[in-house]
Image (cartoon, rainbow, N blue to C red):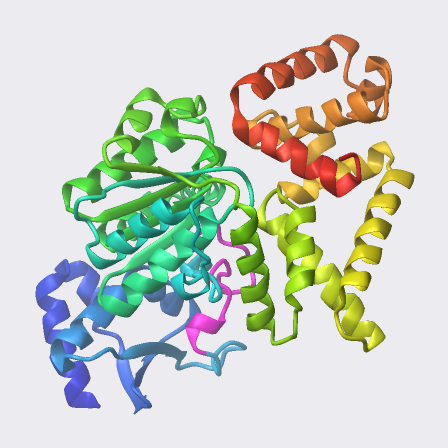
Amino acid sequence: MQNLWDRARCLLKDRLDPDAFNKWIAIIRPCENEGGRLTLEVPDTYTAKHIQDNFAEKIKDALWDTTHRSVGVDFRVAQPDPSASLPVSAVPSDRKAGGQESPGIQNDIDRLKERFTFENFIVGDCNSFVHSAGLAVSRDPGGAYNPLFIYGGVGLGKTHVLHAIGHQIRRENPRLKIVCTSGETFTNIVMNAVNSKSMDSLRSKFRGLCDVLLVDDIQFVSSSQFVQTELFHTFNALYNDGKQVVITSDQPPSALDVLMDRLRSRFEWGLIADIQPPDEETRVRILLRKAQIEEYDLPFDVAEFLASRYSGSVRELEGALNRVSAHALLMKQAITLDMARRISIKTLNEGRGRVTSERVIRTVADYYNLSPVDIRGPKRHRAVSIPRYIAMGIIRDHLKFSLPQIGRIFDNRSHTTVLSGLKTLDKMVQTEASVNNAIRDICLTLGFM
């Protein structure tokens, strides 16, 4: 164990700045080596967190070069500490000593969703091109399709493909370092790094220690020039070093007005692939595959009925299956076509009978992973304003509220402010398919379709 660490430490001494090595690496003492994991002892919690955030990947690289195999690393605090019995990976990354919040880089941005793999992705005419492009990128990261830009409506499988690419790359190239984030999370990380004066750590994470960058929902990145400039330089650094970038959005790059021109143009350098709503045959296969994964029996005629009834997003389709399977489980009955019909009709009738402005706002908020407070409140960035306009439009069109009534619901906005928002929505309905898809899915959930 001591010999292993000594050899790795020699490599680190050659690779790191002398001051950084003496301050952070020389003080580490190896204490355990079991089950392919090495436990390293450090003086205190703050040191453990700093090393974890800034040097963990470099340490793993040195251990790999020493042993030619993957070695997991945990840190243990030498002095008595409430978190001393835990490896640092189990301690929340946004905590400093004493329990105070630290707006550092979030460790959980790298986590890939386990069920989103290519094995669980149902391929049809609607998504075969995206599927093929994702596999090609997985086999040759940084090759011909760089960047890969995937776009399509909500709930069609963009996130699934993004995470599947990450899983496949990790399987075939375990040494490559993958960073997976979203437009909104990237924004928050940049702003937190500015406030905590840790931009060097951020840039190391997203550039120096990154071989594959996966960014979901780029349309929700802040319009802030500083944030987008940081994204621009991150993209350039990765692209110039032959690192792979994969991005998803609800629109193609040319339609993303929130982005600076130079970012939009760079996202168009590689391959742009769109994903369409699944046809009925593909929807049936999606339902049967989900039932297989969840290990319950789904008759083919029930899958056909649900596929014909729910023709929007995959998310909506799976939600319908979840309601039917939950009913069967609770009632201890087999899933039948009659049951599926009754639940479908009941859901539709309940939606039509109880729709209020509060329910509309809550449904829109759930659809966009926001809170009702966000929808009603003063925030004006695109990630909130578009859902707000959609909620206003549904309340206007289906509940027949007047503009002053809508204004009172939305934080006492004026008549002219509401009118301006609705005009913006009407224009977007004419030009942006993603907005149309969202309105359709939300109205279907509410029972208006």
- Front residue (pair 165, 69): 165
Q: Relative to 243, does residue 435 appear above or below in the rendering? A: above
Is residue 133 toward the left or the right of residue 142 in the image? right
Q: What residue is shown at x 15% (from left), y 45% (from top)?
A: 241
Is residue 285 toward the left or the right of residue 248 in the image? right
- Front residue (pair 218, 329): 329
What is the number of callouts on the image?
A: 0
- Front residue (pair 125, 121): 125
Residues rendered magenta in the picture: 87-105
- Res 154 quadrant in image: top right
Q: Quadrant of the N terminus?
A: bottom left
Q: Relative to 422, does residue 349 appear above or below in the rendering? A: below
Instruction: Considering the whole magenta stretch, tell me its main secondary structure.
Output: loop
Q: What residue is shown at x 32% (from left), y 20% (from top)?
A: 261
Q: What residue is shown at x 19% (from left), y 49% (from top)?
A: 142
Assess whether residue 192 is covered by the magenta stretch: no
Q: Quadrant of the C terminus?
A: top right
Is residue 397 toward the left or the right of residue 310 in the image? right
* Percent position of residue 200, x then y: 29, 46
Q: Is residue 201 visible?
A: no
Q: Is residue 374 visible?
A: yes
Residue that sits furthest to the right in the current view: 353
